[in-house]
């Protein structure tokens, strides 16, 4: 576990420099923060929600799941073939390669599909893997996030500041 933590710390900087350390976003409203507890989709559709969830994932040493998901979302917006190839290779090296300290947890079927698709990468090369990681975050990390001090503290802060105004 210490080796994983050390490798994780050493690899915090990703080759995909286009992903900001945290997304720029407005301060969430109390309704928005409460909505995150109603559905994982609401959390993931909110830039502020993704930032808070990402901070939580960092405490669990699984931030790479969010980084991978964000990288896939960004890849889907690309149209330029050369840029798609480049970004797909970087995503592969950063999150799929078994040599990467930020490797995400995927089953062998999805890995095989990706390896085949990497012959001719497209903006949808990682769709199966992205869905698998989204599902993993939803089932595994999200329930813990809702019970975390990070979320409860934010909920308290936004509720308190809105009752003052």
Image (tube, grey):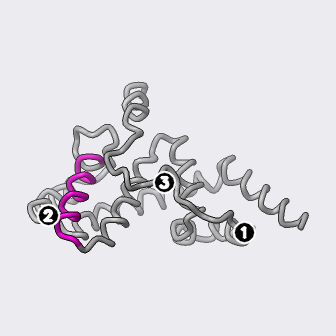
Between residue 131 and residue 27, name the one nearer to us: 27
| Residue 23 coordinates in the image, percent (x, y) | 52, 58
Viewer-nearest residue: 131 or 48: 48
Identify the residue at horizontal 51%, vertical 48% (top origin).
57
Location of mark 2 (residue)? 117
The residue sitting at 65% across, 49% down in the picture is 148
- Please tell me whether residue 1 belongs to the stretch shown in magenta: no
| Rendered image: mark on residue 140 | 3
Q: Disc 1 versus disc 2: distance between alpha carbons?
A: 41 Å
What's the residue at 66%, 49% (across, down)? 150
The span shown in magenta is: 80-94
Looking at the rendering, in which quadrant would you find the C terminus?
Answer: bottom right
Badge 2 vs badge 3, beta-carbon distance below 8 Å? no
Disc 1 target residue: 29
Say whether disc 1 or disc 2 marks the residue closer to the N-terminus: 1
Quarter of the figure with the N terminus: top left
């Amino acid at each position: 576990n210490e080796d994983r933590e050390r490798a994780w710390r050493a690899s915090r900087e990703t080759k995909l420099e286009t992903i900001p350390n945290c997304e720029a976003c407005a301060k969430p409203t109390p309704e928005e923060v409460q909505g995150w507890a109603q559905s994982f989709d609401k959390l993931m559709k909110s830039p502020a929600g993704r930032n808070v969830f990402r901070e939580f994932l960092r405490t669990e040493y699984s931030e790479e799941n969010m980084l991978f998901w964000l990288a896939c979302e960004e890849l889907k917006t690309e149209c330029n073939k050369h840029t798609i190839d480049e970004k797909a290779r970087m995503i592969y090296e950063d999150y799929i390669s078994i040599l990467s300290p930020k490797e995400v947890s995927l089953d062998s079927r999805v890995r095989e599909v990706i390896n085949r698709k990497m012959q001719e990468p497209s903006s949808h090369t990682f769709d199966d893997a992205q869905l698998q990681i989204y599902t993993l975050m939803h089932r595994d990390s999200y329930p813990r996030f809702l019970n975390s001090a990070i979320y409860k503290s934010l909920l308290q802060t936004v509720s308190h500041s809105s009752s003052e105004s």
